[in-house]
Image: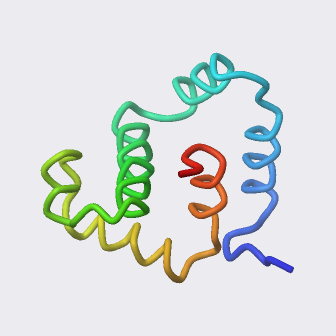
């Protein structure tokens, strides 16, 4: 069984909020209210990096196409390899290739 490292009442509330979203429009509305533009760009960049790493794109090409630093790319790669399998689960859903 998975035990989150950061679980508490606040993070439980966030996870429940995310699970309650029923559409892309609701997700956009929630994210625009909840996150700054910079936070949203950072999260979306990491997801794009994860997709590219899954497709075996090189760090240099990922950095060029996304603007992500090699430190960010490396952090995402570590999460893919040694993390809680969150990226892996999501990538199977959104990028099944």
Farthest-out residue, right: 1
Residue placed at 49% from the left, 73% from the top? Answer: 79
| 23 in relation to 95, above or below | above
Q: Is residue 49 left or right of residue 80?
A: left
Q: Is residue 38 left or right of residue 22?
A: left
> Image quarter for residue 74?
bottom left
| 12 in relation to 88, above or below | above
Q: Is residue 5 left or right of residue 40?
A: right
Residue placed at 80% from the left, 55% from the top? Answer: 12
**Could you say where residue 66 lies in the image, as x and y percent from the top left?**
23, 46
| 10 in relation to 84, above or below | above
**Could you say where residue 83 lies in the image, as x and y percent from the top left?**
57, 77
Q: Is residue 29 left or right of residue 61?
A: right
> Image quarter for residue 55?
bottom left
Farthest-out residue, front: 97
| 27 in relation to 47, above or below | above
**Could you say where residue 49 lies in the image, as x and y percent from the top left?**
35, 55
Which residue is nearer to you in this view: 91 or 82? 91
**Could you say where residue 82 lies in the image, as x and y percent from the top left?**
53, 83
Which residue is nearer to you in this view: 10 or 83? 83
Residue placed at 19% from the left, 60% from the top? Answer: 69
Residue placed at 43% from the left, 78% from the top? Answer: 78
Q: In the picture, which quadrant includes the N terminus?
A: bottom right
């Amino acid at each position: 069984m998975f035990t989150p490292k950061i679980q508490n009442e606040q993070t439980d509330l966030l996870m429940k909020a995310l699970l309650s979203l029923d559409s892309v429009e609701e997700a956009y509305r929630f994210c625009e209210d909840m996150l700054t533009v910079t936070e949203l760009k950072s999260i979306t960049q990491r997801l794009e990096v994860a997709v590219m790493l899954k497709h075996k794109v090189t760090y240099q090409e990922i950095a060029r196409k996304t603007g992500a630093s090699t430190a960010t790319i490396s952090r995402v790669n570590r999460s893919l390899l040694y993390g809680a399998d969150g990226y892996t689960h999501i990538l199977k859903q959104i990028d099944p290739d």
